């Protein structure tokens, strides 16, 4: 688990779908499985609601990592939503790689409502990964700096 | 200017123990358009809600943010509260500072800082909230119950008694399920068939119940109140309306090579068969894989002997579509296949049997007419060993981690069956624990020890070895005395773990019902909503939701029925108002959106549009059917111009949250 | 300095590398153990003593020296615990103490000359430092 680092805390935004991953996040809370405070969750009805532009906006605003969580393929509450997510985000990752910016600052994970412990694991892993990558410099839009 | 009210809940010490709630309220009070901010111990309580109502009136609030537990808990509560004081229920946003903040952090400073950020994000979102109004959708007053065991039968009976039509779809040729296979039931030792068959008959004869046996659900679409279901009635090869149920065909069938599923493979059945004598409907089925006529073209004896001319080799599967308002899953269970338990003798000797097989052996209607015999020799056993927890409480890959709940009780039941009829047969039960939590359950198990002289030994069996002569040796230990034991029983009974029916997962996908890693359907809330799936309109009944015995199954069946009745009793349902909406003046009519809609909710129409620069134009634009739209948002991202947006989760709202969090 | 009971148990647990807290005391390992009837502390008891931090009773037990390292216990355990690893950890803890060889080099004289080389090597590996 990521220990609080007094010098650098990566900013991480997590998009979670209401039916599976948000419930999984709640499950992590119910089971008291800790993960770092710098991960903050935005609820969406389905992972397919997440526009790649939201993700780029997060990076532009200073997020160091963005993770998108949805239902396991085949289990989407809206049947096909996460298939679209999968395809769109593959393209987004391709684009980020092509632009030479760290595609590994963005991750897609499938977490079901029953996987509370796994949600915490995934968050801890991602937080450690982003902390190792350091601050997001390339995608940051300094005009948005507060 | 907007007037936002922010209410921070302590949730007792659940939040306040880790988050400085007063500091959160103070931090947001500084924001210019937050007209009022406070904290309180239990925001969801009557007093808490009164605080919200008072603040709305005193400060003319027009939108509300509650920082509390997960919206999945109390979003509905706070929406109702807002509505009661004149604020549109969708002008409320929840910041989850419990499950996603106080419960996952230890450091108070960190948790408070995170709670403040989450509150600010909710405030940023609520600034863009607009009043939304739920639509109405109709409710088809018919329920579908998938599964015709005791759970499905009981649920259907309760729904039918309330005056609603209900269909039971059962994949076996008869209803009755596992309970029909049992001999007696604990703790009363009632004859299982005697208490089940009247219910089966009631279900068959009830004017509101339609049975689809030897049928499976093929396709489901739609949503709560309006499910469209396709049912496949598999071809029995027998005309049900002509068949008299005399059973002559089953007696004369020359094919005897197929193990009977009902008799747990202890006996063979014909290719044309009725699973058991009290089957409902009492109409045979031809197993086309075993039938000589279908395999070779020769035979046809059943058709020749049938006095009613009911055999029809040309019969085809039939597809039926029907509309339902609610669906109940009651698909039951099977025993864990024991092929990985060769170390307990499974597969190495016919005399190592499963608990359900023992049930068939002692059942007077079973393959041996109730005589307890060793399957290998046909002789009565002199001693029997019962092994508990085979594949249960097992964290390795061959077992299930959960306790199967019913085995401790049925082991005692089995032990008493045997000792009752055969007082000279020695019975030993090896256990890890004895779990007897129900009414009269512990007393029941103690009778086995105290009255029937069953040996209960604490210590799991290590291995069962079969020698060249087929003799069994059981290696066990008595942990209480520390002694090693070697026993030589004639029969070993393995209490196998229970697991959901094999097609549970396929059904879950079809219905988009939640299912866990053990293939049990997931309930909406483990404590407070045990019979509903998180998916609206889908309900759960029986073993398919978790291991349970018959009393609990019947209780749960009634509970599921009550929920269904509550749903079907409504004249209309309020639909989710968070639907997609097309901003026509920037819609180019590219038609990218309809492709991604799972519900066919988007169509296109030619309209006269007033463009952004004030001219009139005839254009094809997207139109969303709000009754069909479920609000997933796929179209919003497919749309290249952001003309498609999702109410309640608009682009502006989400971007505001992103900005606030980064 | 002598280690406390609990510290000794911690050391053994660290060597064993198996999660003994998962044990539900079902006794399957003891039942499967071919040498179990000759042991003072059957495998499930050894695990129990370790769970409870009774280091002293573990190192005094005769059972680790009866253990054949056949791993039937580990294979049969429904909880993924390895009593075999506990046995090995106790053996190592004992023989690593100076002067605590279970099989002194001098004892070689007592063995028949035609004893298989392999048996000698295996025995010395297991019972000696």
Image (cartoon, coloured by chain):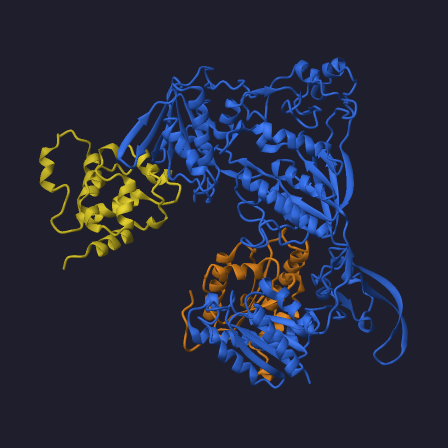
Query: Foreground: B412 or B219?
Result: B412
Residue A136 visible, this angle = no
In the figure, B180 relative to C5: above or below?
above
Query: Foreground: A116 or B554?
Result: B554
Compared across the picture, whether B602 is left or right of B197 comes to right
Q: Quadrant of the N terminus of chain B?
A: bottom right
Q: Quadrant of residue B571?
A: bottom right
Task: Name the residue at 68% across, 74% down.
Answer: B85
In the figure, B289 relative to C87: above or below?
above
Q: Quadrant of residue B421?
A: top left
Compared across the picture, whether B212 is left or right of A65 comes to right
Total count of labels: 0
Query: Foreground: B154 or B147?
Result: B154
Chain for colour yellow:
C
**Could you tell me residue B604's position as x and y percent?**
84, 62
Chain for colour orange:
A
Compared across the picture, whether B350 is left or right of B50 comes to left
In the figure, B259 relative to B580: above or below?
above
Residue B450 visible, this angle = yes
Task: Name the residue at 45% across, 37% down.
Answer: B441
User: Chain B in the picture: what colour?
Assistant: blue
């Amino acid at each position: 688990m990521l220990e609080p680092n007094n010098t650098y805390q990566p900013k991480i935004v997590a998009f979670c779908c209401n039916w599976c991953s948000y419930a999984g996040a709640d499950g992590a809370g119910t089971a008291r499985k800790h993960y770092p405070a710098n991960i903050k969750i935005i609820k969406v009805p389905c992972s397919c609601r997440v526009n790649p532009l939201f993700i780029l906006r997060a990076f532009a605003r200073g997020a160091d990592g963005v993770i998108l969580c949805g239902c396991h393929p085949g289990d989407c509450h809206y049947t096909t939503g996460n298939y679209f997510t999968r395809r769109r985000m593959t393209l987004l990752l391709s684009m980020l790689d092509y632009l030479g910016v760290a595609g590994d600052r963005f991750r897609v994970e499938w977490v079901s409502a029953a996987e509370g412990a796994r949600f915490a694991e995934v968050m801890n892993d991602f937080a450690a990964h982003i902390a190792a990558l350091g601050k997001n410099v390339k995608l940051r839009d300094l005009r948005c700096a507060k | 200017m907007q007037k936002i009210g922010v209410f921070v809940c302590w949730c007792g010490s659940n939040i306040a123990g880790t988050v400085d709630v007063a500091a959160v309220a103070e931090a947001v009070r500084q924001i210019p358009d937050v007209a009022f901010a406070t904290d309180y111990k239990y925001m969801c309580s009557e007093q808490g809600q009164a605080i919200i109502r008072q603040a709305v009136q005193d400060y003319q609030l027009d939108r509300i943010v509650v920082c509390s537990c997960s919206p999945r808990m109390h979003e509905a509560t706070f929406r109702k509260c807002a509505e009661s004081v004149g604020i549109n229920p969708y002008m409320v946003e929840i910041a989850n500072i419990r499950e996603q903040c106080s419960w996952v952090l230890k450091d108070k400073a960190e948790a408070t800082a995170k709670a403040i950020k989450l509150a600010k994000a909710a405030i940023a979102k609520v600034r863009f909230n607009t009043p939304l109004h739920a639509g109405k959708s109709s409710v088809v007053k018919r329920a579908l119950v998938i599964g015709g065991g005791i759970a499905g039968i009981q649920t259907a009976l309760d729904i039918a008694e309330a005056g609603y039509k209900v269909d039971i779809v059962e994949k076996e040729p008869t209803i009755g399920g596992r309970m029909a296979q049992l001999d007696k039931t604990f703790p009363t030792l009632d004859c299982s068939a005697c208490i089940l068959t009247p219910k089966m008959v009631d279900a068959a004869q009830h004017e509101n119940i339609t049975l689809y046996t030897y049928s499976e659900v093929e396709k489901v679409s739609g949503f709560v109140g309006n499910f469209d279901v396709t049912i496949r009635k598999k071809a029995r090869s027998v005309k049900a309306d002509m068949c008299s149920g005399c059973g002559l065909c089953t007696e004369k069938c020359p094919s005897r090579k197929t193990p009977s599923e009902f008799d747990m493979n202890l006996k063979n059945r014909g290719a044309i068969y009725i699973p058991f004598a009290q089957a409902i409907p009492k109409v045979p089925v031809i197993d086309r894989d075993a039938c000589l006529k279908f395999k070779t073209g020769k035979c046809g004896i059943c058709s020749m002997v049938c006095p009613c001319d009911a055999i029809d080799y040309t019969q085809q599967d039939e597809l039926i579509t029907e509309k339902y308002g609610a669906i109940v899953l009651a698909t039951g269970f099977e025993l864990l296949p024991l092929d990985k338990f060769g170390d307990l003798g499974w597969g190495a000797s016919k005399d190592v049997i499963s608990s359900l097989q023992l049930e068939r052996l002692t059942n007077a209607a079973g393959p041996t007419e109730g005589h307890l015999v060793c399957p290998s020799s046909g002789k009565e056993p002199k001693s029997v060993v019962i092994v508990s927890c085979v594949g249960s409480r097992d964290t390795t890959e061959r077992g299930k981690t959960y306790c199967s709940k019913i085995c401790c009780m049925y082991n005692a039941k089995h032990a008493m069956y045997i000792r009752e009829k055969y007082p000279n047969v020695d019975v030993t039960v090896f256990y890890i624990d004895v779990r007897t939590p129900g009414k009269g359950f512990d007393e029941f198990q103690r009778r086995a020890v105290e009255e029937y002289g069953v040996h209960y030994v604490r210590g799991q069996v290590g291995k069962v070895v079969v020698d060249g002569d087929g003799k069994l040796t059981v290696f066990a230990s008595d942990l209480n005395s520390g002694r090693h034991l070697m026993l030589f029983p004639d029969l070993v009974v393995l209490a196998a773990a229970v697991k959901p029916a094999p097609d549970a997962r396929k059904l879950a996908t079809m219905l988009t019902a939640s299912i866990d890693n053990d293939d049990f359907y997931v309930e909406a809330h483990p404590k407070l909503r045990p019979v509903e799936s998180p998916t609206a309109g889908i309900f759960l009944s029986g073993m398919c939701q978790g291991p349970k015995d018959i009393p609990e199954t019947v209780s749960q069946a009634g509970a599921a029925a009550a929920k269904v009745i509550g749903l079907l009793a409504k004249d209309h349902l309020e639909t989710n108002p968070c639907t997609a909406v097309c901003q026509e003046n920037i819609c180019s009519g590219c038609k990218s959106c309809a492709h991604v809609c799972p519900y066919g909710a988007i169509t296109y129409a030619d309209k006269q549009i007033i463009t952004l620069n004030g001219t009139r134009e005839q254009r094809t634009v997207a139109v969303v059917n709000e009754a069909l739209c479920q609000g997933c948002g796929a179209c919003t991202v497919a749309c290249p111009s952001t003309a498609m947006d999702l109410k309640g989760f608009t682009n502006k709202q989400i971007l505001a949250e992103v900005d606030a969090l980064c | 300095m002598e280690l406390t009971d609990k510290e000794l148990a911690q050391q053994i647990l660290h060597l064993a590398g198996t999660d003994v807290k998962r044990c539900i005391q079902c006794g399957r390992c003891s039942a499967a153990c071919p040498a179990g009837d000759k042991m003072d502390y059957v495998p499930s008891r050894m695990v129990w003593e370790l769970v409870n931090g009774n280091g002293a009773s573990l190192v005094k037990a005769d059972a680790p020296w009866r253990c054949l390292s056949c791993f039937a216990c580990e294979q049969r355990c429904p909880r993924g615990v390895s009593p075999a690893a506990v046995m090995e950890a106790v053996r190592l803890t004992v023989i690593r103490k100076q002067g605590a060889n279970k099989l002194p080099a001098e004892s070689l004289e007592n063995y028949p000359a035609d004893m298989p080389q392999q048996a000698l090597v295996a025995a010395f590996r297991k019972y000696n430092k």
